[in-house]
Structure formats: structure tokens, C-alpha cells
Amino acid sequence: MKKMLSFIMSAAMVFSSAVVADVAAEGEKVDNMVIFGDSISTGYGLDLETEYTYGQICADYLGCNVENYAVDGLDTSELCTMLEELTDEQKQAVSDADVVVVSIGGNDIIHYSSKSILDYAARRNLLKPEYTAEDIPEDPGVSALTQMINFRGEGGLQEYAESGLLALGDLNKELKALSMNLRLTTGDNAYGANEGVIHNQIMPNIDKAVKMIDAVNPDARIIVQTVYQPLQFSPYFMESEYGSGNYAMMLTQLREDFRLIMDTFKEELQTIEGIEIADVLYQFTSLKESSDSCNATPGYAHYFTNIEEPLEPETEGGKTKDIHPNQKGQLAIAATVLDVIGIKNTSLDTLYVKIFNDIKDNGYYPAIAYKTFMNNIDLVPGDVNGDGLTDSVDATAVLSEYALASTGKQTTFDETQKVIGNINHDQFIDSVDATMMMMYYAKLSTGSSMDVFEFLHTIQE
């Protein structure tokens, strides 16, 4: 059954371009939005001629103007400097904004982590022959890691990790110290007192930036994104790429350490006054609890980024093995921001819906993130008769629709019902949808309170 459902979920959902009445709920109309941030907001890694940033998706969905002032590589201190030096045009844009969205902090974490890992590689002679410790930049990024460290060659990091338990223990000690330095403000790690980088450096800068935005426009809603955890490789990729040896164990430890880091960032962000939080971390991970992340269910960042694509040197134009959001990731960020804003556009003729329709593997779109996506267009899979339940009545209606289509007769579902009836979001309304509705209804009949998205999530697991 699980294999069959996995096959079902792999098909692409087809949304009609028919327009349903727009509904503005909860939130007020947004005319102007301003974006500050880093490469997540600039759309680094996208083909900007054919793909769209979350800012562009939100602009189309809301029917508003968006000014995007994001800069690749920006960190929190640089954001503060940028806000201190706004041009008159930028100040006017902020002053006119109904919503200001900020994505920041990821580069602070990346720079600190990359510097620590590069310094460790230099101490253990794991740099490529053409590099020494003197070549390590002050604020290196991920590209410096891939460029300077000998990962899989002779005498490289993987060979070192596989050389024995002492080497693995040494690597894990380094990773644990890195995590503790970022997360903890008290106590000691293996190398000394914990630095509390998130609490002592990153959050004060974000707080300062928020206050500067508020000073220009005290009426604007300020939405700050959490930082997603990119090191969530799929189980199949881990097994095929790295096997089950010490190197794979080290990557597992790295995933857990960065889970704790991003959880801490999220917790600390909740202490900043005057903001609303767009929890991109939760959407990309798409697990009920971050602690549910394990080798079997690591989280879904590998779906929302290109981190599992083959590694190509940037000097050759390669941007693969990339932790930046791909088009699916940009859509998920847009859905998260729009969910916070609280305005529902139920039209099926928007860029928001078109992008989902164009995703070739949207049958695998993680159920938790899919719920946010669907909530924004005010649709719940399965409830074709609109009585608030997904049950045998809906299943029967779907079977009737399927029978009409199968015999070439005129079908009866309107365009919205076609979306709702397609519970597994493939391109067909058929007996499989009816079966899944009955499976979900049977689950509820046992006293379960799970919603249909939780049900889809159990199937994905």
C-alpha cells in the first residue's frame, strides 16, 4: 500500500485557471510591501527569466507593489548599516509600506560555521594542496568550503572520517563545539567558554534593525523569517551517496547540530518585540516537531533546495549542491509569509497557483507545507460537498464523477470541486481519491482528530 501511495503522490497536480471569487479575510488590504534581506530574498540560484522569488509571488497574489532591497551575502550587521544609510527613495518606500518582510541571520550562521570548519580543516591538513590557513577568509561562505576543503579526494575529509573512531570522535567534538558556541551563552565546550553568537551578536542586530524600520514607519507590519535547516538529505540520497560508514554518521551528527542551532534562532527570534514571525524553518522541515528529525525522516529541505544536485565548481558556472531555495522553496516561503499576512485570495488564476501546477514532482510536496499552501486559497482536500467533513458521501461523489469521466459523459464538478476532490493532488479524480477519502474517514471513525493534511503526512512518512 505504501509503495502504491508513493506512486500516486508522485503525479503532478493540475489546477484549473478558472477564477473563483477573491476573499479578503482577517488581514487588511496590502498595497505596498518592502523586502530586506539576503540571497534567499534576491532569488539566488533561480533562473530569474522563468522562475520567481517569493516577493514576486506575494506581489501577484496580493495585487500589491513590492520593493525588494535584498542583497546577496548580507548579514545582520550589514543590514543595520544598510538601514542607517537608506536613500530618500528607500525611506519613502518603507514609509509607504503596509508590510516589511525581513530574511536575515542565515549568513551570520554560515560565516561563523564555515570559518570554524575551515580552521579545523587547516589544523588537520584537510585543505586542498593549493590552500593554507592564511587563505581562509574572515567571513567565508559555503562556496569557500567547497572550494578549499578536500572532501572526498585522497587524504580528504571523508577518508579521515572513515579512518577510525578516534577521527570520527574528533570531528564530532568539533561540530558539537561549533553548535554550542552558536547556541549557548553559558558553560564550556571542548575548546573553552561558549560564545552565544545567536544571543549575543545576531539577535541584538535584528532587534536594532527592527527598531530602525519601526522608526521610519511605525504602522508597518514587520515580518521576520526564521532560518531553515538546509542539511536534511533524503534517506535514499544518504545511502546512495555516503553509505552507512563514519562519514555518514558525521553528516547525521551535523544535521542534528544544525537542527539545534536553527531551533535556537527561532526561540531567540520570539523575544524580539514588534515583529511577526514567518516560520520558514517549520515549513521546510515539515515535521510536527523538529526533534522528529532522524535518518528515516530527516525533514524536507532537500525538496525545497537543490542540495542533492551534483556538485559543480562555481568557477564553471555551477550553482548546484545549493542550499538556497529553489522554485518550490520560494513558493513555500511565499505561502508562509502570506499565511502570516492573513489575506486569502481564492482565485485559481494566480502566479501562486500556477507555480504549484508547474512543479513536476508536486505530488511529493510535503503535507505540512501543502496545508499552508492550500489554506491561503481556502481549500481543504476531500470535502467536495462543502459540509465540513471528508467522508463516505464525498467518496461516493468522487466515484460518480470518475464514472462519468470514464464513460465519456458530461462531468458535474466545478473547477473548485475538481481541486478539492483530487485529495492526493495528482492529475486525476478517480477511485484512488475515493479510497483515500474512505481511509481518512475510517481513521476519524476510530476517534482520531487528525485533519486531512496530517493524514497525507502519515502517508508520506
Image (cartoon, rainbow, N blue to C red):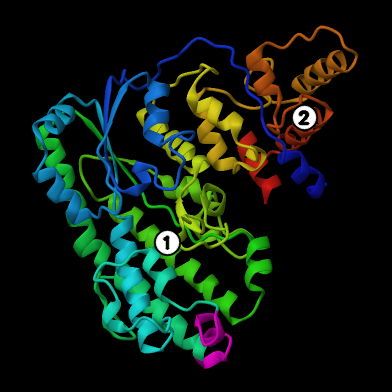
Q: Nearer the viewer, residue 414 or 392?
A: 414
Q: x%, y% of residue 67?
A: 26, 30
Residue 162: say if magenta.
yes
- Work out whether 215 lies above or below 378: below
Residue under circle 1? 315
Residue 237: say if magenta.
no
Name the element at disc 2: helix
Place residue 113 in its image quadrant.
bottom left
Residue under circle 2? 433
How much space separates mark 1 and mark 2, taking CA atoms?
A: 48 Å
Q: x%, y% of residue 362?
A: 63, 38
Q: x%, y% of residue 322?
A: 47, 56
Q: Nearer the viewer, residue 428 or 118?
A: 118
- Work out whether 74 lies above or below 62: below
Q: What's the residue type where badge 1 is placed? A: Thr
Q: Answer yes or no: is residue 393 visible.
A: yes
Q: Answer yes or no: is residue 449 visible.
A: no
Q: Nearer the viewer, mark 1 or mark 2?
A: 1
Which residue corresponds to the image point at 77% horizontal and 34% vertical from the top-left?
436
Q: What's the residue type where badge 2 is placed? A: Asp
Name the element at disc 1: helix
